Amino acid sequence: MRFFFVSFLATTYVLAITAAPVDSIFSQLSTICKQFLFSIVTDDVTCLPISQLWIQAISIDWENYTSSNIGQFTPLLDTLCTAPRCAKSLTNELVVKLHQDCFSDLPQSVIQIIGYVLNNYEPIVTVGCTRDSQQRYCLLEEGKIILGNRNTHLTDIPDNELCTECTQKWVEVYDEQYSAKYANRTFNFTGISQIKQRCEFKVPG
């Protein structure tokens, strides 16, 4: 399934990496790069509660999660979404530091993903923390559909699964906050346009 929020995939990959053994993640990185990454954890930045997320991430069965047990992500999202939001100046500072200290490691996938998340922190957290009218995380509700349609093209997904309350909320987030800043980077613009046309979503004026 070509879901229109790349951030869902990026966040999942980052958390999966976080849950893996540290040695296997960082063994190929330079010493200065590893020191920088560990400093993010040890500096205890309140808007990036890495140590708490770590504890919750390692309890998740990343290899066997399905629509029936996707709720195991709830504690992790609770921690992420109740933390104060990082200022853009902080995430920009971390991106600059990442490029400086991990310059020789930039081709490594873990560094690319960390850079992606820092560059797109605002929309990733906003999308991840969006809730429906019953206060359920949209990411988890739509995740059930994503898991059931992972190999399905967007045009083949039934309207009742595609044109949901959560999808509309995400489209509104995109239109109201991020269309200009992240159109070609965080979001799949073509997918969003197709969904808006098919579901006739309109942002309230």
Image (cartoon, rainbow, N blue to C red):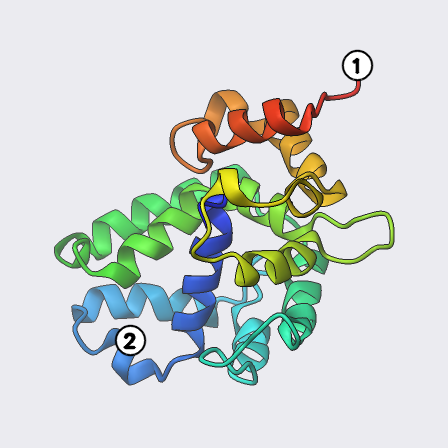
Q: Alpha-carbon distance for marks 2 and 1?
A: 47 Å
**Residue 201, x across and y down, in percent:** 70, 25
Q: Residue at x 54, y 77 (%)?
A: 65
The label shown at residue 25 is 2
Q: 10 Å neighbourhood of mark 2: few (<14), some, or many (≥20)?
A: some
Residue type at mark 2?
A: Ile
Residue type indicated by callout 1: Gly
| Apparent side of residue 84 relative to residue 131 in the rendered image (left or right) | left
Q: Residue at x 21, y 66 (%)?
A: 32
Residue 63 in sight in this render: yes
Residue 11, compared with residue 86, is above or below; it is below
Closer-to-camera residue (140/44): 140
The structure residue drawn at horizontal position 41% and vertical position 40%, both measured from the top left corner, is 92
Secondary-structure class at tag 2: helix
Q: Position of residue 56 (x, y in %)?
A: 59, 78
Q: Dot 1 corresponds to which residue?
A: 205
First along the sequence among labels 2 and 1: 2
